[in-house]
Image: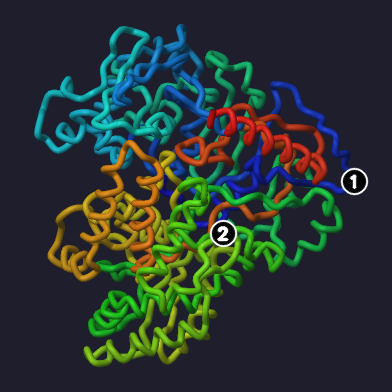
Amino acid sequence: MKLKTKSLLTAMLVGVTLLTAACGNSKSSSKSSQSSADSKYSYVYATDPDNFDYTVTSRQTNSGHLINFVNGLLENDKYGRLVGALAKSWTVSKDGKTYTYHLRKGINWVDSEGNVYAKVKAQDFVTGLKHAVAAKSETLYVVQDSIVGLSDYVNGKTKDFSTVGVKALNDTTVQYKLNKPETFWNSKLTYGVMFPVNAKFLKSQGKDFGKAAANGILYNGPYLLANFTSKSVIEYKKNDNYWDKKDVHIKDVKLTYNDGSNPDGLYKSFVTGDYTSATVYPTSADYKNVVKNSKNNIIWSDQDSSVYNFTFNLNRQSYNNTSKKTDKAKQDTHKAIMNRDFRLAIQFGFNKTSYNAQSTGQAGAMKSIRNMMTPPNFVQVKGQPYGDTVEKDLQALDSKAFGNVNLADAQDGTFDATKAKEYIAKAKKALQAEGVSFPIHLDLPADQKAVTTLNKAKSFKSTVEKNLGKDNVVIDIQLLPEDKYLAATYQATTAAASDYDISNASGWSPDYDDPSSYLEIYNPDSGAMLTTLGLTAGKSTASDTAAKKELNMSEYADLLAKAEAITDDTDARYTAFAKAEAWLLNSGIQIPVNSLGGTPSVTKKVPYTQPYAQSGMYSSLGWIFKGVKVQTKPVTIAQYNKAHKAWVAKRAEIAKADDK
């Protein structure tokens, strides 16, 4: 799932996530005082949603809302288990390739006013997938190669959707046939591309289906959209026709637009009771008052499964936002970016700790650092963290560059000023021989009003220029209004529209529980996030093809294919993916920086009452309101720690039982 940069949006996500459940007044009681089922929740949002077609959109700024409006077959409970949502039960064939789901009876589609429109039927899942193809879903990659016949239908090799392996066996039974076994298949069902669509409503709406408005979709989830006023407010109301309404404790949700220009205002609004939660900023001048009033309530969240990175534009085509004056300057920058030693020099010269400290202060500077695309503990290889295998493979690829690199979370594994100087010297020698003039100027876009994010951009500029020398590299921060910033980065829909040399505007959260969900996004043939590298999936322009060839990205594609082919041995599969990940890290075309989490906040949300997931739409922790309970007083450290201990113990108990 494509994530927006770690800006105010991230602050909102972290501030409201249960894993950050911390908060408020030091004088408040640590005892939970839960509100009734008609409680309210208020906070902020940073970017308007622009698409409510849940089968199509890949942006968390859309999906974070939609997960409250529409259910699929399965959902995650608060311990991370996959449990029935619209499906009450399911079976799997012995060969692991046929999944049959039995729907709950009496599930309703309702309109934005809560009026019953129709019953949810098995055929709605067939309609949903067919529509996703017709609408050119951004998320088809999640299932296109999984479901029998789907890829051929998408590519036009067949025109008959009945050849696709999804069938409504009757009104309450839907079946999927897979090309090969996928132990992680069920985790894909928590993603919008697999959600149902009512055919009658779809036809009646035409091109207006999925428009970002209350009447753009039908609802079968816990909430209805009550109000959306652009750059002003988004409000939800409880769906009284929801199948599991007993587990919906918050009746009204109100999110107010905030441009990030006044981070301290979040805490102040929390204190006055306007907001239910608030991220707090140790670097702000007002933080001393936060500590004075709430020192017993500020809790640091754990890291989650997201990853935010810097990406190099490997084939830049747009120069609307640049400090470059000549074509030669543009060509010199491109040649430098295509030089691996130059890319590694940037990475080794980048101090992630200083970068993170711009929002969390020194106390939290390392808490969210990530050094891999896939979290080191996302899966296990023979009982050991996946990251251990990746680290060994990376060191084997280039022991000089990575022999002493530590890929574990919560520490800066790649910052090395001495090595940065060594690699920029190597790059400079080679590039000057090609006629490249120094210093190399790199355009880095930044939202001019998002204070915290802007400070991070300045930190990146400062440490890179200091450690590589301004006579070698200059980071030109391009200050842009929010709309232009988003159009050039996070919301760029094509490689050609990606207007930067290097960007930190996007991140990634996995779509399903397998390393491929992280690594396939840069597959040169089909990658969902290639545009952030300035590249296009498959064959494209001559310059695009040339860039992929120069980087030898076909080797990466081959490594991915070898791993994907292993379906009967998870240890072997993950070992193969580790080699692909090592290739990606060794290439230096992107720099993993941090995850969500590792951030202090205050809240009145009861800890660990909402769904938890590492992947899919339910990993949008801060956005999900089903199951969430709100108490009248701020959560205390003691309350949080007690809840955290119980939650961890229960997850361990579940994992042990699953291993038997």
Residue displayed at 64% across by 65% down: 365
Residue displayed at 64% across by 24% down: 251
Which quadrant of the figure contains the C terminus? Answer: top right
Q: Position of residue 29 (x, y in %)?
A: 88, 39
Residue linked to disc 1: 27
Q: For residue 513, which numbered disc appears in the image? A: none
Residue 504's image quarter?
Answer: bottom left
In the image, residue 164 sits, relative to residue 587, either above or below, namely above
Contact check, label 2 and label 1, Cβ < 8 Å: no
Examine the rendering and report whether any part of residue 504 can be seen.
Answer: no
Judge the density around disc 1: few (<14), some (14-19), many (≥20) Cα neighbours within 10 Å. some
Q: Say left or right for 481 vs 194.
A: right
Q: Say left or right for 176 vs 280.
A: left
| Numbered disc 1: secondary structure | loop
Which quadrant of the figure contains the N terminus? Answer: top left
Residue linked to disc 2: 409
Judge the density around disc 2: few (<14), some (14-19), many (≥20) Cα neighbours within 10 Å. many
Residue displayed at 44% across by 40% down: 513
Depth check: 419 or 154 in front? 419
Disc 2 marks which amino acid?
Asp
Q: Position of residue 445 (x, y in %)?
A: 43, 68
Count up the numbered dots.
2
In the image, residue 39 sits, relative to residue 379, either above or below, namely above
Q: Position of residue 448 (x, y in %)?
A: 51, 66
Depth check: 144 or 334 in front? 144
